[in-house]
Amino acid sequence: MSKANINIPDGIGVTERANLRHVFSRRALAGRIWLTLFYLVLVIFTVMPIVALVVRGFIDTEGGRVVLTLSAVSGVLAEPSYWSAMWNTVIISIGAMLLATAIGVVLAWCLVRTNVPWARLLEQLATLPIFIPPFIGAFAWVLIGAPRVGLLNLTARGLGAGELVDIYTYLGIIWTTAIYIAPYVMMIVAAALRNMDPSLEEAAQISGLNRVRTMLFITLPVVAPSILSGAVLSFVICIGLFGTPVLLGMTKEIYMVTTRIYTELQHFPPNFGIVAVLAIYLMVLSVIANLLQSWALKGRSFVTVTGKGFRPRIITLAGGRYLVAAVIWLYLVLTVIGPVIIIAAAAFSTFTWSGVFTWANVTFLWTSEDVAATFWNSIVITIIAATATTVLGFVVSWITVRTRMAGREMLQFVVLLPMSIPSLAFALGVSFFWLWMPWSVYATIWIIIIGLIGRYVSYAVRAVTSSLMQIHPELEESARVSGFGWVSTIGRITLPLVLPAIISSWVMVYSIYISELSMVLPLYTANTRTLSILSFDTWAVGEFSQVASLSLLQLVLGAGVMWLVTAFTRQRHATAV
């Protein structure tokens, strides 16, 4: 706060005026110090891991000295297996992106713009695959489509039809990846379709275009930015996935970059230079995807929302609407209902599909010391990280929306930067950075918490900012005029109004953290394992029934907390009304 901005009432003596100026200056200085410290914390959480990852790819230790070198880069470029992994990553990610985008766009169009029955219920159910961890989804499809033990193949052999599917293929990986990220595309495109002026489609049909041509040449081009955003998000998620490629690819040596990073980390000692270069490759792919999106939309206008009110135009499908609903139900069976039922059946079997059922795999959940330790690690890490992420997200949103502080635009950029970085690459950057720091957070739960906050704080910022922007600042200004301080104004006015967005943000990051695998993999130790790591380790030794029971536990922890929070929110809303 400059002196020019300090308003001191008239009639105050020179000494008192000087004292007030001194008080105001100290408060302004304290504010700048706190803001600087806040910026520093965010940079450490979000930017420094990315910097550390890039630096680690180009340095090495020789004779006790750190030197710049291209040895790791040349080592990756000279090894055919790394090129194969890079190529597999591109092919599988593009294939999954295209399939997920096609599924998501079709779902969005059917549920938003047609008279398909139970549209609202189907749309809510179609978002559920987001809350099923990719590792669990992939494991469910192993139980369904594995060559020897898959349920479909066992049934087909029993009928004399041989084996129908093999999930351990390129197509199997693409399919399993795509169906669980399609809801992201669906939600993004559905929002755009609801905001689209239907007069454009009406004009096209008056000009002679049928419904299909109208959709292809009018509707889809207008919502192209949303489709591209969903496609790019799908691609970035695909290139950073670890659980799905490992479960489905390693059996037939279909390695992706994340798989190669994992195998390199198993060597002793690991070649961290190679690992860093492979992770940088994932970052480069992500940057290229985002640049291509910007280039595709550059110089084009997609504005259709004006001051004129409108309602989305519903297309009548006549008798075909029941067929469309049936297809959507089939998708839900394949992605949510079927996998959960199959995992539950496997959890109560002596081994996979033995036909002999037992409680042993379920009692294992509360009798095993490993499960108890990893359970509490997961709960502590998830609750602390989700709460800290939401708090930081609210503070960043408030600074960027409600203040004119210098550098607030840069603050938002810093927070959103990790969104375009694959989780495994970011986690490696976190491990490299904190290994170089004098503070001993490595080998504790705190490095996992720090990594999760840095990677996902942007999710909380996006969720809270959209809600905060809908609240007129005059409400807070009125409270300030009435004598409330900033803390009281935020606590009594702002927080209650944005509480639903804050709760939604907390639930969203909680659902991610409780089953996160890629972020935890490079950061955990024997004492800081989580349930996702225990599930992966149990799968590695072939205990599929125990993996199924652990998967059920993770689903209960995720869905149970979401149900409790939803019930609390509804009860609070009913009480308020």
Image: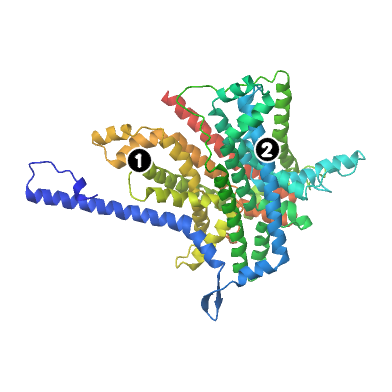
Mark 2, Cα crowd under 10 Å, few <14 / some 14-19 / many 20+, is: some
Mark 2: which amino acid? Answer: Ala
Q: Is residue 467 left or right of residue 156?
A: left
User: Quick one: which residue is furthest to the bottom in this view?
Assistant: 63
Q: Residue furthest right?
A: 160
Q: Quick check: can you spot residue 308?
A: yes
User: Closer to the camera, 16 or 495?
Assistant: 16
Q: Quadrant of residue 359?
A: top right
- Left or right side of 9 for 468: right
Q: Mark 2 touching mark 1, by CB under 8 A?
A: no
Mark seen at residue 32: none
Residue 370 picture location, percent across and down:
63, 55
Q: Position of residue 401 (x, y in %)?
A: 38, 41
Query: Which picture quadrant has residue 527?
Result: bottom right
Q: Nearer the viewer, residue 497 or 355?
A: 497
Q: Residue at x 73, y 37 (%)?
A: 334
2 vs 1, front mark: 2
| Numbered disc 2: secondary structure | helix
- Looking at the image, which is closer to me, 540 or 315? 315
Q: Is residue 184 left or right of residue 66?
A: right
Q: Is residue 450 above or below residue 482?
A: below
Relative vertical location of residue 259 with respect to residue 314 in this rendering, above or below? below
Residue hosting label 1: 402
Instruction: Identify the residue shown where x is 52% and y is 30%.
Output: 304
| Marks 2/1: CA–CA distance | 39 Å
- Picture quadrant where residue 355 is located: top right
Q: Position of residue 521 (x, y in %)?
A: 61, 57
Residue behind mark 2: 102
Q: Amino acid at mark 1?
A: Arg
Q: Position of residue 178 (x, y in %)?
A: 68, 43
Q: Residue at x 47, y 47 (%)?
A: 389
